Image (cartoon, helix red, strand yellow):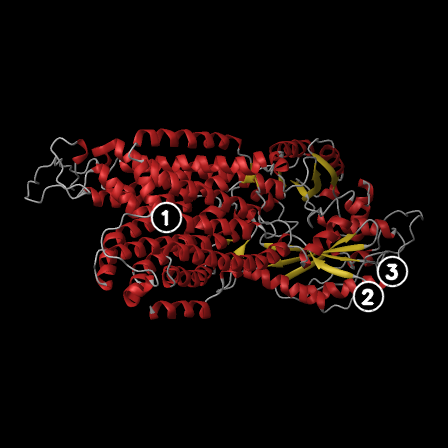
Amino acid sequence: MILWIAAAIAAVQLLPSLSSVTQNNNTSFLPAYAPSQRAANLATPLEPSGSISIPVVVARSSGQLTSDDTGAIARLQKKLAAKPSVTKVKDAGRSAGGQAEQLQVLATQPVKAGTTQHQANVMLVDNLRSAIAKTSMPGDLQAHLAGQTAVSVDNSKQGGKTGNQVQMVSMALIVVLLLLIFRALLAPLVSLLPAVLVLTMAGPLIAEAAKHGLGISSLAQQMLIVLVLGAGTDYGLFLVFRVREELRAGLPPKEAVAKAVARVGESITFSAGTVIAALLSLRAASFGVYSNLGYPLAMGIGLMLLAGLTLLPATLAIIGRAVFWPSRIQHGIQTGELWGRISGSIVQRPLATLMAGLVLFGGLAYFATGYTASGFGGATSAPSGSDSADGQALLTKYFPRTSANPTQAVFQLPKAAWDDPSVLAAAQHKLQSAAELKNVTGPLDPNGLSLTPSQYIELHAALGPAQNLSPAPKVPAQTAGTARKTATMSAKNAEGTAADVGGKGATADPLMDGKFTVAEYQAYRATAQYVSPDGRTVQYSTALTAGDPSTTAAMNAVPSIRTEVSGVARRIGATDNGVVGQAADLYDVSNTSGNDMKSVIPIAIAVIGVLLALVMRSLIAPLFLIVSVALSYFAALGLAVLLFIKLDNSGGLVFILPFLMFIFLLALGEDYNILVMTRIREEAHELSLREAVKRALSATGNTVTSAGLVLAGTFAVFAVVGGSSPNGGEMRDVGTGLALGILMDTFLVRTLLVPSTVLLLGKWNWWPSKLIHRHGQLEADGEVPVRSAAGEQDTPGDPQAAEVRE
């Protein structure tokens, strides 16, 4: 016990916290070969590969930006550019109304030893916000970070708070349930202690693994809490109930603990083994959210198994009978708890019980056909009141067409855009005519400021690459409305082209010499976000007719959008093309997730089937046990569809729900299967099969139902507490679906349908184990006659007197 406590303290003190390494964006877990990721690589000349782009919006609450504001923005750019890992600060232009300026911070984020990518992002965001805080802003000028990186950082901080709430409420609920179950003061604390210590250790250990390349989603963080507390308490209940049973049989405390470990240790080991096997099968998934769940959760369950077989028995042996105080341990065989007695009586009519269960579960499973997927974007909106929420609001208000979650069509051209700007006009025209797209902006109308192809050529010839221009020329341009002169620049002025403001080695801004208007200068400067420095990569920002890119409708429109963009690419002679944006990412998430279900689930079934065959010593039992999980899975999914889609009109359930429900119900459901079936086999050595089933249910019924209530309760907390957090829809769906599935699995499948199937199959349950029918006769090796539960010798010819001996 002392070693476990010391190890937990050391882990907390020496290792990082789990919340510091979590990621919230599902699309960051896509494989590199996904079309959206290939398209993002195509756009790297506009945003270099491996770099992070963070928008900074500087705006007034009213009125246009002044010359003082322009000076403040220039100072801010220099401060931002001076921060570690920042390589460039681009000015993406001024809003059409002149009230806001958008900066783009580009940074490289090499992950140093001992840190993760997310930790590097947190440090970058904190540094940028520090630069903003230290920049003096005139009047009501304000600056905020926007974009997915800032949103992800703020969501991870919120996720840490949510994780603490889930853990505290779950622990409180478990203690209350165990107090009601045991009617004792110490038993709940003793049962829960190993899970608490394991959770304290597992988080930092997993975070340390994340520093060496293991991706951790916010879902993994929350699921670890629920799984360790729920499953860990289950293993504790398996052992504590058996210790109490042995104490009732008259054994002293230490012997009772030793015998309990000998009897249920195998069940606990194989129960944890099935969960670990199912979790490790997730490593075969292509989608990182699934594959990266495997290792951290398996680590948690592995530690929990070790604690359940060492720490808990030691604690029980030390405390002894006082664990159950003030309840009294009465000697003698007990009649069993309420649900054990009820279920034992019901299954005495196995065929009727099984048929009724199939009708009920089949009816619920029918509603599973109405399942609609949603929630592909993960945590995409910023927490209310955060800096990124303010930044996103300003971005949407002042740059609605170009920056508020746009979808980009990217083209790679055979030659520079300024050599043949007609392709820019042709591409924009074709994209605007596509039914799936609207509000298309590109190099010829950046930020709502229009340019003709000839103007674009002249401006490029006079000013050079747009990426190098400062927010305003040092020599005032002609006022708007005056005639524009023929665009030529002296060699002296052409050589004076500046680098990006805040970039390394910047030179003086080019002189305007009165050849262009301020509007033309600003419009050309804003084209930097659409055309790469070499002119061969061009992108267009668009809105989607289907609506916000985070919606399922927008995701479903992606195949048509990709087809349209490919057609435009052929029209303008582009050598390559792609679609970048959230909708495209989510479509690839959907496809990858669906493919993973087809590959991972068969692996999980096969691995768990082998483990069940080993612990059951049978090839038949694993078959109907896995079928029973499938039955409860479809029924639970159908019930979730009925509650949330049919009755609540939610529009869909989070896309990861079917996959995670099957994996977790398969793994956790087999926990109870193993406990019940091994007890039936144990009793069948001494009793008829019918009496063995009745005795086993009487002995384990309370254990299974108590464990099921605890596990379902923790998932319910996950659904309620996690679901009430920002972007908590996926937590609500996953938690509710698993809680419903576990309750039905506990009270109906494991204690009614499975035992009924056992009775109907008879000797075939254990095939091909060697069976010896004893029909009231002595064993060949001279053992005592078979006796019924009442202690009387079974009569010859009684079909229920068939006994099993391995």
Q: Is residue 267 visible?
A: yes
Q: Which residue is mark 3?
A: 475
779 vs 463, left or right, is left
- Nearer-the-camera pick, 542 or 727: 727
Query: Where is residue 443 shown, x and y percent of the image?
Result: 75, 44
First of labels 3, 1 by sequence position: 1
Q: CA distance from mark 2 to mark 1?
A: 59 Å
The image quadrant that residue 579 belongs to is: top right
Q: Is residue 753 above or below residue 57?
A: above
Give residue 138's mark.
2
Query: Where is residue 444 shown, x and y percent of the image?
Result: 78, 42
First of labels 2, 1 by sequence position: 2
Q: Is residue 465 visible?
A: no
Q: Which structural element holds mark 1? A: helix
Q: Which residue is mark 1?
A: 275
The image quadrant that residue 796 belongs to is: top left
Number of numbered discs overlaid on the protein picture = 3
Q: CA distance from mark 2 to mark 3?
A: 23 Å
Query: Where is residue 803 shown, x and y percent of the image?
Result: 16, 38
> Answer yes or no: do the residues labelled 2 and 3 have beta carbons within 8 Å?
no
Q: Residues within 10 Å of mark 2 (few under 14, many from 20)?
A: few
Q: CA distance from mark 3 to mark 1?
A: 71 Å
427 vs 124, left or right, is right
Q: Residues within 10 Å of mark 1 (few under 14, many from 20)?
A: many
304 vs 727, left or right, is left
